[in-house]
């Protein structure tokens, strides 16, 4: 059954990876510096921000989908861009979903490292920016796991992409939305096949990252 | 930038005076060892001097420096050195880069100083896989490369075996010989005898004695000092 739908399947898998990886890349670029700033800086309102960030980590995808839908719909503030029901809209929604996860988890990793490094870095005269860069580099192996957690979330969610993407065949259909559709149509073998592929992809990416990480830790301590 | 003047310096945390009205002056030249039992405030006093902590009251002034609050030409070596996740050589150049030294000179200085502390053969090894003694020597090299006028050392041999301790002491002596003022804490009396020119004795946050090393050991100024010297000797 997987062989039979080869061409169609290939496109769906490719689009899924494109959307989720792009969203995770954006969320990483935004989330890691945010996590570092929260780990190092002490400012009024920091506690409130931390609580909000932790709450946002559990943001329901359908809510994110709905909000992005409202923003991008014809009558919405960003309606003129014509992004609704495009892969770009799906990337936006997933990036919003994943950024708090990467920022929140990296904040924890970086704050632990900061406890260890703070005196030494301040003694050497590091500015907060230099200290943040050093922490990000020195915790790189742990941060790989953080980014993977974000990728897992993006690749697995269906609520946001189905609302803002519309599950249009050949345009915005990804693995999760296809599984959802095939299940409701009653084509359970196809849905199950897609599900297996999705799980296998997530599994492989995690395994590869884990192997790289433990090899690096063994080598560099 | 010396002398360093402490005027009525107190540091209060959690309602407790960890440093209690300490006044003294540290001059160019003599190796200063801060002695005292655990919890007497040695490490906190050193962090106040280095500028990592700000006094709750009192003043700390670098009288010979234009930047009287926190001049740059000082460095500190901690009891447990923080090794950055990169090679030994890169750990040294990291500090030099923060100090604004140009790249070419960074590499040269790092090579020289690693050679001087005996770490030439492990210069490219990841710092975190080095032994405890090697890590502390690397921390010394990282501080020394900055060519500081004053080097603070907080119990630099507390976690080391006798062999590594001897080497660290040799390097501290070398750094002193190169013209850097040494200020070091220890609770090890033998080490104080070997390395000190003058002793600051801390007790319960107060500066209980400030004397040349011979006088400190030969004629204890108070019963407290005498008891410390007597009580500690068997383990020194």
Image: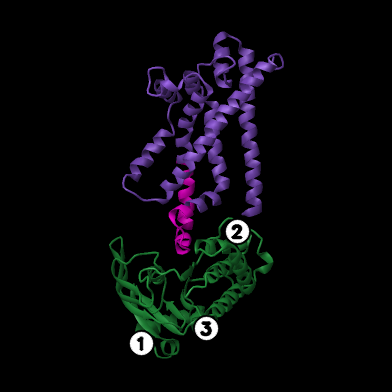
Chain colours: A purple, B green
Residue A57 part of the magenta-drawn span: no
- The Cα–Cα distance between marks 3 and 2, rounded to whole angstroms, is 30 Å
Q: Report the residue at 46% width, 47% height from top.
A: A36
* Residue A92 on image: x %, y %: 48, 28
Over which residues does the magenta segment extend?
A104-131
Circle 1 crowding by C-alpha within 10 Å: few under 14, some 14–19, many from 20: some
Q: Are marks 3 and 2 on the same chain?
A: yes
> Which label is found at residue B49?
none
Q: Quadrant of residue A191?
A: top right
**Magenta stretch: includes residue A120:** yes
Q: Which residue was labeled with disc 2?
A: B128
Position in image of residue B234 (x %, y %): 50, 80
- Checking the image for residue B194, the label placed there is 3
Measured as percent of width and height from the top left, residue B80 is found at 51, 64
**Which callout, 2 or 1, points at the residue further toward the start of the chain?**
2
Q: Which residue is mark 1?
A: B221
């Amino acid at each position: 059954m997987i062989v039979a739908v080869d061409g169609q399947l290939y496109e769906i898998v490719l689009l899924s990876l494109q959307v989720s990886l792009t969203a995770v890349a954006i969320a990483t670029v935004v989330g890691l510096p945010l996590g570092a700033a929260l780990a190092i800086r002490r400012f009024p309102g920091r506690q409130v921000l931390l609580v909000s960030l932790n709450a946002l980590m559990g943001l329901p995808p359908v809510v994110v989908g709905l909000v992005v839908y409202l923003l991008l719909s014809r009558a919405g503030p960003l309606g003129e861009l014509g992004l609704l029901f495009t892969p770009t809209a799906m990337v936006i929604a997933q990036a919003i979903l994943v950024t708090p996860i990467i920022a929140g988890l990296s904040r924890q990793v970086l704050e632990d490292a900061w406890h260890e490094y703070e005196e030494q870095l301040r003694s050497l005269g590091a500015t907060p920016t230099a200290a943040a860069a050093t922490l990000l580099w020195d915790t790189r192996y742990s941060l790989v796991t953080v980014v993977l957690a974000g990728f897992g979330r993006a690749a697995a969610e269906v609520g946001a992409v189905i609302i803002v993407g519309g599950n249009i065949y050949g345009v915005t259909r990804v693995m999760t939305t296809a599984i959802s559709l095939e299940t409701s149509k009653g084509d359970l073998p196809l849905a199950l096949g897609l599900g297996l592929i999705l799980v296998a992809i997530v599994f492989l990416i995690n395994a590869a990252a884990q192997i790289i990480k433990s090899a690096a830790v063994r080598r560099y301590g | 930038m010396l002398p360093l003047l402490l005027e009525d310096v107190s540091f209060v945390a959690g309602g407790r005076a960890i440093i209690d009205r300490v006044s003294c002056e540290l001059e160019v030249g003599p190796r200063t060892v801060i002695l005292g039992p655990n919890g007497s405030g040695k490490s906190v006093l050193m962090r106040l001097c280095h500028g990592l902590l700000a006094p709750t009251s009192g003043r700390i002034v670098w009288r010979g420096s234009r930047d009287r609050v926190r001049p740059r030409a000082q460095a500190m070596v901690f009891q447990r050195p923080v090794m950055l996740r990169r090679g030994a050589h890169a750990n040294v150049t990291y500090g030099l880069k923060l100090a604004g030294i140009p790249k070419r000179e960074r590499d040269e200085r790092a090579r020289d100083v690693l050679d001087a502390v005996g770490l030439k053969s492990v210069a490219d090894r990841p710092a975190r896989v080095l032994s405890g003694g090697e890590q502390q020597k690397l921390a010394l090299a990282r501080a020394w490369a900055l060519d500081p006028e004053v080097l603070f050392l907080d119990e630099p041999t507390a976690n080391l075996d006798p062999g590594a301790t001897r080497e660290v002491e040799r390097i501290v002596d070398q750094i002193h010989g190169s013209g850097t003022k040494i200020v070091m804490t220890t609770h090890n009396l033998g080490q104080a005898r070997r390395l000190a020119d003058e002793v600051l004795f801390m007790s319960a946050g107060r500066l209980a004695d400030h004397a040349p090393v011979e006088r400190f050991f030969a004629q204890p100024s108070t019963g407290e000092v005498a008891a410390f010297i007597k009580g500690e000797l068997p383990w020194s």
